[in-house]
Image (spheres, rainbow, N blue to C red):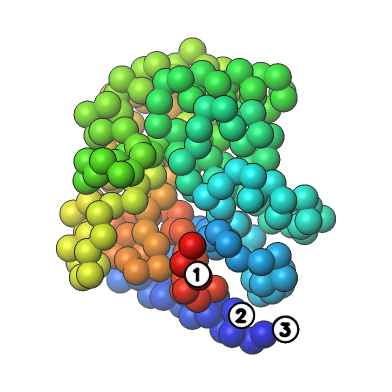
Amino acid sequence: MEEGIKARIEQVRKWIAQAAARVGRDPDGVELVAVTKTVPVSRIREAIDSGVTVLGETRVHEAAEKIALLRSLPVKWHLIGHLQTNKSKLAAELFDLIHSLDSPKLAASLDKHGAALGKQVRVLIEVNLGGEPGKSGIRDDELTSLLQACRPHAHLTIEGLMAVPPFREDPEEIRPFFRRLRDLRDQASVIHPGYHLRHLSMGMSHDFEVAIEEGATLVRIGTAIFGERPQA
């Protein structure tokens, strides 16, 4: 086994613990999602053998192939990329948590497939904090209406929010976006007390320590574990 992956995972966990300690948080309240986009199954196995228990994929069909090959291993799979409604049935079947709910139409579709499967489809609402046209996610002022639209969906469980803020070279410049997502979650929890919005999925390899200081409960780490991905 290549020792590099194990050593990098240990380093990431150390950074997570240090970031949590700086703000008086329990590091166990931060879950590491190892992002395996384009990563071959052999290297994913190394990560699992090194203690990773949650894997994140951005594409449904790429994930389906990997899940089939790794089905016997004790890991959970999260969808962290944009989800099209026409792939919602497969996503509902495959994933333990979907980070990218971004429309009433998608919510209704996931609820329908959850009912057919006899399971709760667990989701986070994705918010496009920077209003960037090339990114998915709702505007922050659409959050209340989407939560309201999801109330009738008995097989949809909304557990929090997710965001991919605009990139800044200095992670400190991303802090206000993370703080904004936390504030949105806290405000929504007051307006919609029926939802248990416990999760904030925010922070990647470049900025996850700042995200943890601002309340992240799920950090999506790919490059810091697996190295730079080849450009498509």
Instruction: Tell us which disc is closer to us: 3 or 2.
Output: 3
Query: 22 above or below 7?
Result: above
Residue 173, percent across and down?
A: 17, 63
Q: Residue at x 34, y 51 (%)?
A: 164
* Side (left or right) of 205 relative to 89: left
Q: Residue at x 59, y 85 (%)?
A: 4
Q: Are marks 3 and 2 in contact (CB under 8 Å)?
A: yes
Q: Earlier in the sequence, mark 3 or mark 1?
A: 3
Q: Which corner quadrant of the image does residue 47 belong to?
A: bottom right
Q: Quadrant of the N terminus?
A: bottom right
Q: Disc 3 residue type? A: Met
Residue 66, percent across and down?
A: 71, 55
Instruction: Tell us which disc is closer to us: 3 or 1.
Output: 1
Query: Which residue lies under the disc numbered 1?
Result: 229
Instruction: Report crowding for label 2: few under 14, some 14 to 19, many 20 or more residues within 10 A (C-alpha).
Output: many
* Residue 121 visible at all: no
Query: 131 above or below 6?
Result: above
Instruction: Report crowding for label 1: few under 14, some 14 to 19, many 20 or more residues within 10 A (C-alpha).
Output: few
Query: Which residue lies under the disc numbered 3?
Result: 1
* Residue 73 visible at all: yes
Q: Label 2 to label 1, Cα distance in Å?
A: 18 Å
Query: Which residue lies under the disc numbered 2?
Result: 6
Q: Label 3 to label 2, Cα distance in Å?
A: 9 Å
Q: Disc 2 residue type? A: Lys
